[in-house]
């Protein structure tokens, strides 16, 4: 409708099949992590390249449908040679907790170790993406762990159902660890952060356990949120 009124449009998309289906007049596909359509935060030169490539489609006269691939990966997708986390967490136990109390104790202890690094990351970058759940970190494990036993705790946040609160608690967990592990030293790639989180932290194993519990849950909200939105598809199984 906008185009029919004489206003030219350009779409920047992260999921190429979506662009193929919608067939916008001009689309630029970017091979970046979800949530980063312009690439890296605090990298204006790279962001300008993406915007220039997108706006350059307005000068094209071919069509009627253009779908162009941006040629480069985002810098965060290139592994940092020799990177190792400076967040010193205990090795994963040979057996994971088998009850709610065990998970609460274990996850709370790991979060307590990660917390100072997360605070250091906030000083380093002057920002955080933690806070969606509106719950402090010490309340995350006590709220989320009962879902493993089939219990559905009441939500304490207005406007969020129990399942949606669980989803944003999981998002806060992932964000806190992802920021904490970047508090010092050279910056890792997003793949290195994800590999570390899903294979080296108890929190990663906890979120996998939540997904498994959700798959057979009769509670529709938990079943939907837990099975689809807590663990990204590439990390459903340990790597």
Image (spheres, grey):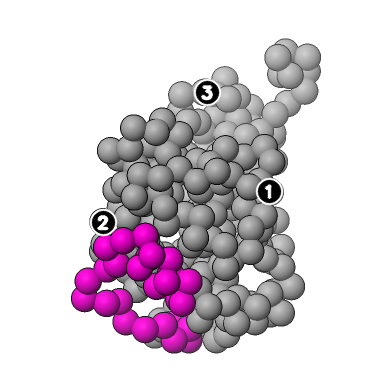
**180 and 94: which is toward the camera:** 94
Tell me if residue 157 comes above or below residue 192 in the rendering: above
Quadrant into which the C terminus falls: bottom left
Circle 2 residue: 237
In the rendered image, residue 68, in percent from the top left (x then y), is placed at 52, 38
Element carrying mark 2: loop
**25 and 212: which is toward the camera:** 212
Circle 3 residue: 23
In the rendered image, residue 198, in percent from the top left (x then y), is placed at 36, 64
Q: Quadrant of residue 5?
A: top right
Report the residue at 27% width, 63% height from top: 98
Tell me if residue 34 comes above or below residue 180 in the rendering: above
Q: Quadrant of residue 135?
A: bottom right
From the image, state whether disc 2 or disc 1 is nearer to you.
Answer: 2
From the image, state whether disc 2 or disc 3 is nearer to you.
Answer: 2
> From mark 2 to mark 3, how far is it between C-alphas?
34 Å
Q: Earlier in the sequence, mark 1 or mark 3?
A: 3
> From mark 2 to mark 1, how far is it between C-alphas?
36 Å
Q: Which of marks 2 and 3 is nearer the N terminus?
A: 3
- The magenta region covers 85-110
Compared across the picture, whether 212 is left or right of 34 comes to: left
> From mark 1 to mark 3, how far is it between C-alphas?
20 Å
Compared across the picture, whether 81 is left or right of 212 comes to: right
Contact, CB < 8 Å: mark 2 with mark 3?
Answer: no
Q: Which of marks 2 and 1 is nearer the N terminus?
A: 1
Contact, CB < 8 Å: mark 1 with mark 3?
Answer: no
């Amino acid at each position: 409708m906008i185009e029919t009124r004489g206003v030219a449009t350009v779409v920047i998309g992260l999921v190429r099949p979506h662009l193929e289906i919608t067939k916008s007049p001009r689309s630029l596909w970017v091979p970046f992590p979800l949530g980063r359509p312009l690439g890296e935060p605090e990298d204006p030169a790279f962001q300008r390249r993406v915007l220039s490539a997108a706006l350059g489609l307005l000068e094209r006269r071919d069509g009627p449908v253009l779908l162009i691939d941006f040629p480069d990966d985002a810098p965060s997708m290139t592994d940092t040679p020799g990177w190792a986390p400076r967040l010193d967490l205990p090795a994963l136990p040979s057996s994971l907790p088998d009850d709610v109390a065990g998970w609460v104790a274990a996850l709370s202890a790991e979060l307590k170790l990660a917390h100072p690094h997360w605070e250091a990351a906030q000083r380093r970058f002057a920002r955080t993406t933690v806070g969606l759940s509106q719950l402090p970190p010490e309340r995350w494990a006590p709220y989320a762990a009962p879902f493993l036993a089939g219990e559905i705790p009441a939500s304490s946040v207005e406007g969020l159902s129990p399942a949606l609160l669980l989803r944003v608690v999981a998002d806060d967990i992932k964000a806190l660890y992802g920021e904490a592990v970047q508090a010092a030293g050279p910056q890792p790639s997003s793949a290195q952060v994800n590999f570390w989180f899903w294979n080296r932290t108890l929190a990663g194993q906890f979120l996998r356990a939540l997904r498994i519990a959700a798959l057979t849950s009769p509670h529709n909200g938990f079943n939907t949120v837990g099975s689809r939105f807590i663990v990204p598809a590439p990390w459903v199984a340990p790597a």
